[in-house]
Image (spheres, rainbow, N blue to C red):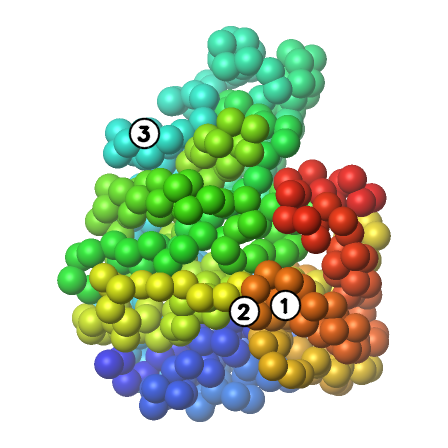
Amino acid sequence: MIESLLVANRGEIARRIIRTAKRLGIRVIAVHSEADADLPFVAEADEAVLIGPPNPALSYRNTEAILAAAKSTGAQAIHPGYGFLSENAEFARTVEASGLIWVGPDADAITAMGDKINARNLMAAAGVPVAPGTTDPAADLDAAVTAAAEIGYPVMVKAAAGGGGMGMGVSVDETGLRTEYDKVRAFAERMFGDGSVLIERYFPRVRHVEVQILGLADGRVVALGERECSVQRRNQKLVEESPSPAVSPELRSRLLAAAVRAGEAVGYRNAGTVECLFDPSTGEFFFLEMNTRLQVEHPVTEYVYGIDLVEEQLRVASGLAPTFDPDALTPSGHAIEMRINAEDPKRFLPGPGVVRTWVEPTGEGVRVDSGYTEGNTVTPFYDSLLAKLIVSGATREEALDRAKAAVAAFQIEGPKNNVPFFAELLTNDEFLSGAYDTGIVSRMR
């Protein structure tokens, strides 16, 4: 097993990784910006290194500073968490070239799945269903218009190098397409340094379902069930649950088999997620993208399968067998995760500030993965995620009951937060029925 680990991230995911690593007897090094010096993850590490000012480009995306911290502290491995450098193939290669262990898939897999067009084509060749769309970037507006006419409106205009719900727009006709194409292309060039755009069929009433995969050290790829991620605002997830209330046993079998094929197609190692769109009206599902990292919502899978995904990541990176029997994976119960963000619960606009009160709920089947505590300052420099509230139960109904009680007990004062939104969601008939889709939040608002 790895003996020393540098966590190249911050907030709740850094604390999450630190918790498992310390349980395994691994020495943990945290890196942090000036803005995060007082956050819990810094204090909980065995050693902490200041790597730069608040600007992420000068700290959490500063590869030279992170590698220098690893060298000065004698770290043996780097875990990137999610976001920042987690899907940066060049960084992964540099880490390994430096003689360090990269806790994640290899750079070739990251590269292969990082471009949405390339990923779509790879998946189609592997027999994974993909939605109707372009197999090459739409080189210009005329090419986009031609492609959209062939695919049929409405269409989604996507940044080929995008991710995290960013760089996307919907067009219902050619007029809208002309506007969205220019907008997405400009955004993609600015945010990702790559203005390539693809055109894909848009499904107005669709569900977002993903599969957790794990590429083992012996070369096998296993699927650890699916997660429902359809409660979203601005194409970004707010709630995830496992198993999905929309997935039948027959569909689950097809979905998980497709996800395994997707992983095998790129020789995948470590944790990853195959994201799909599911059309309940036809029973069809389509590959959306593969996230080559640990997901924010991984705790719901941990509850349902009774494993620690961070531990499994560390074991794969160490060349060790998993803690579970890959041939006897059996899910049990139901889990729901709610992303507690520092944002207005109505319009979902960021709301930083000093945390004056922070009281986490407790009880059976309740877990809180938090990045902050009382007295901390939520700054405007990073993602608005404050904590993840995860509940589990023997059934979905029991998990929902525990979710209602936990949301009612979660007290946060200071920064704006979306806890009131979850209280509202948990009384929403559409959500409670399980028959919801990605439009549920817009219908609530």
Q: Name the residue under label 2.
A: 394
Q: Name the residue under label 1.
A: 398
Label 1 – label 2 distance at C-alpha: 6 Å
Q: Do the residues labelled 1 and 2 touch (CB within 8 Å)?
A: yes
**Of labels 3 and 2, the one closer to you:** 2
Amino acid type at mark 1: Glu
State the quadrant of the N terminus: bottom left
Residue 369 against residue 294 in the figure, above or below: below
Report helix, strand or loop for mark 2: loop
* Residue under the image location 45 percent in, 76 percent down: 17
Q: In this view, does 160 lie to the left or right of 95?
A: right
Residue 235 x/y as whole percent: 63, 43
State the quadrant of the C terminus: top right
Residue 392 against residue 37 in the figure, above or below: above
Amino acid type at mark 3: Ala
The residue nearer to you, when weighing 280 against 294, is 280
Residue 337 x/y as whole percent: 60, 63
The residue nearer to you, when weighing 66 against 161, is 161
Q: Is residue 95 left or right of residue 232?
A: left
Report helix, strand or loop for mark 1: helix
Report helix, strand or loop for mark 3: helix
Query: Mark 1: few, some, or many residues within 10 Å (few <14, many ≥20)?
Result: some
* Residue under the image location 34 percent in, 90 percent down: 25
The residue nearer to you, when weighing 146 against 124, is 124
Query: Mark 2: few, some, or many residues within 10 Å (few <14, many ≥20)?
Result: few
Q: Name the residue under label 3.
A: 124
* Residue under the image location 58 percent in, 56 percent down: 240
Label 3 – label 1 distance at C-alpha: 39 Å
Q: In which quarter of the image is residue 223?
A: bottom left
**Of labels 3 and 1, the one closer to you:** 1
Residue 33 against residue 131 in the figure, above or below: below
